[in-house]
Image (cartoon, rainbow, N blue to C red):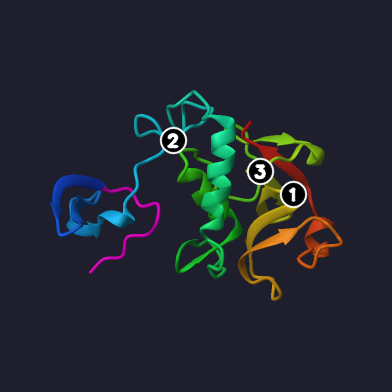
Amino acid sequence: MLTVYKGSLLNVTDELVDGYYKVKLLYGRSGWVSKTALAKRLDEDDFLWSADLEYFLLQAKPDEESFRKQVTETAKEYLGYQYRWAGKSPLGIDCSGLVFMSYMLNGVLLWRDAEIKEAWPVHEIEFEDLRPGDLIYFPGHIAMYLGHGKYINSTGYKEHFGVAISSLRKEDPDYRADLFQMIEKCGSLF
């Protein structure tokens, strides 16, 4: 028995038996996965988008509005997952794992850490310019802006443990003053 996590890349064959497709893993092992658990890659030509040919090959950014909607919906699929440092699976996920997986599952490869890195597709923007799908950077932490003053993140913080939605507005019950005061920068793919 082998566990295949969300976001795993599989070679799906045409062989379908009782709702299960035969799949091949990258190292050659075969198995069966329910067709309801499979999704097409959202990138073109099986390459994730990056601004630098050294990383991946696509040079055209995805459609902005549909990408913003889809990446935030993907992040929300992780709501309730427990926090696990360096995790990016249902067993636990950390802040950069949440952002990385949300973007990767939508065809964009990000730097897998809480910083904006040259040659990777996110660039710095002003806090006032945040739009859904943009990123908020704190010292050693990252979150994704959802719009309407809300953001999603994965944290070990005792009052919001795991993947949760928090607010940037002081009047909201899910406001995190500790994080708001530490915002270092914001970033966007667009």
Q: Describe residue 97's horizontal placement relative to residue 28 as left or right.
A: right
Q: CA distance from mark 2 to mark 3?
A: 20 Å
Mark 3 highlights which residue? 132
At which x and y percent is residue 88?
48, 59
Give residue 6's mark.
none
* Visible residue check, residue 44: yes
Secondary element at tag 2: loop
Q: For the C terminus, which image quadrant?
A: top right
The reply to whether residue 111 is visible in this rendering is no
Q: Residue at x 56, y 56 (%)?
A: 76
| Depth order, front residue of 61/38 | 38
Compared across the picture, whether 64 is left or right of 38 comes to right
For image coordinates 66% across by 37% down, the residue present is 188
Mark 1, residues whose alpha carbon is within 10 Å: few (<14), some, or many (≥20)? few
Q: Where is residue 96 shown, x and y percent of the image? A: 58, 54
**With respect to residue 42, does 144 lie above or below?**
below
Is 113 or 44 nearer to us in this picture?
44
Dominant secondary structure, magenta: loop
Examine the rendered structure and indicate whether residue 110 appears above or below residue 163: above
Residue 79 found in image quarter: bottom right
Instruction: Give, as a single range, the part of the protein colored magenta.
Output: 1-10
Question: What number of labels is visible?
Answer: 3
Indicate which label's residue lies in the foreground, 2 or 1. Answer: 1
Q: Name the mark on residue 48.
A: 2
Name the residue that disc number 1 marks.
148
Residue type at mark 3: give it: Pro
Mark 3 or 1 closer to N-term?
A: 3
Local secondary structure at mark 1: loop
Question: Is residue 9 magenta-colored?
Answer: yes
The amino acid beneath tag 1 is His
Marks 2 & 1, CB-CB < 8 Å contact: no
